[in-house]
Amino acid sequence: MTSDTTQTDLVAEETENLRKLIAKARFILFDFDGPICRLFAGHTAEDVARRLVEWLESRGLRGLLTEEERVHPDPHYVLEAIHRRHPQSDLVTELEERLTQQELKAVTSAMPTPYADPLIRTWSALGGQLAVATNNSARVATAYLARRDLDSCFAPYVFGRTHDLDLLKPHPHCLNQALNAMGADRTASLMIGDAPSDFYAAQNAGVAFIGFARNQDKEKRLRSAGAEVVVESLEPVLRMLRGQA
């Protein structure tokens, strides 16, 4: 068997696995930033992280972060670094609220993920129970969904970051909240996420997983984590759901 034939067989097998996951799913959990939208498309994550660091420095707390943490482009990384040193503190609570306010500003310039809106509407119209399970603030996800007129597809099942940052994914807390609220059968439940933390949370919650990777780096990370079904676009998911593939 040639390598080309082997690759073709692997693609066919993954396509069939994708079809089976979609056909079986009755309760669908979406991560927010990635599968639904690019939250920081216009209000960049790097700017948000920098603002959090500047606020800490204005309070004389520069020493709480390492040099790597001070220049890291992910605001969640900054927040979690402070949480590790001062868990459950007022400082963490205030920093988390500042992050939430920056996320809310980003909603106005967030870019919909291609095919996400019709996928969500189609799945909802076909009777799927949809929920959001995200490490972003639930207030932010709710605000974005309302702007896109998608809130009725999810309401009231939007679950996000709590003040207890130990419960962020890969902890399955927000997934379990969604599953329990929906009264979901976990054998008929599916998570769509774009990060290893989403995959691990789905594993910990006992639900199936589809990885969404909009670039090769994300695909490599998802597959290295153990995700077996990964798509680079939501289009094939939508086509299968509509019975077109």
Image: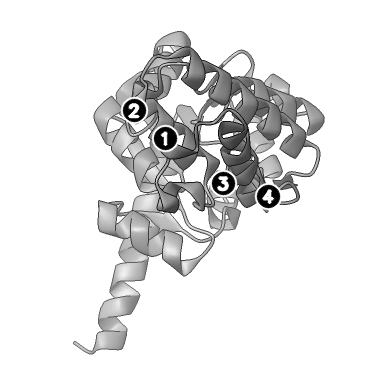
Task: Give the residue number, with chain letter if any, for mark 2.
Answer: 85
Instruction: Name the residue located 54 percent from the left edge and 60 percent from the top edge.
Output: 214
Residue closest to the eye, 162 or 53: 53
Q: Earlier in the sequence, mark 2 or mark 3?
A: 3
The percent position of residue 240, horizontal first and vertical second, equals: 53, 50
Q: Element at badge 3?
A: loop
The reply to whether the C-beta atoms of the residues labelled 4 and 3 are less than 8 Å apart is: no
As shown in the figure, which amino acid type bears the numbered disc 2?
Arg
Badge 1 crowding class, 10 Å Cα cut-off, few under 14, some 14 to 19, many 20 or more, is some
Contact check, label 2 and label 1, Cβ < 8 Å: yes
Q: Which residue is mark 1?
A: 64
What amino acid type is highlighted by mark number 1? Leu
Q: Quickly name the residue at label 4.
A: 44
**Considering the image in quadrants, where does the N terminus appear?**
bottom left
2 or 4: mark nearer the eye:
2
Going from the N terminus, do you reach mark 4 or mark 1 first?
4
Q: Earlier in the sequence, mark 3 or mark 1?
A: 3
Residue at 54% across, 41% down: 75
According to the picture, the residue beneath numbered tag 3 turns out to be 34
Q: Are marks 2 and 4 in contact (CB under 8 Å)?
A: no
User: Which one is in front in this view, the residue at disc 4 or the one at disc 3?
Assistant: 4
Residue 79 seen by the camera:
yes
Q: Nearer the viewer, mark 3 or mark 1?
A: 1
Q: Nearer the viewer, residue 42 or 70?
A: 70
> Are the residues tagged 2 and 3 within 8 Å (C-beta)?
no
Residue 57 percent coordinates (x, y) = 57, 36
Say whether residue 87 is left or right of residue 47.
left
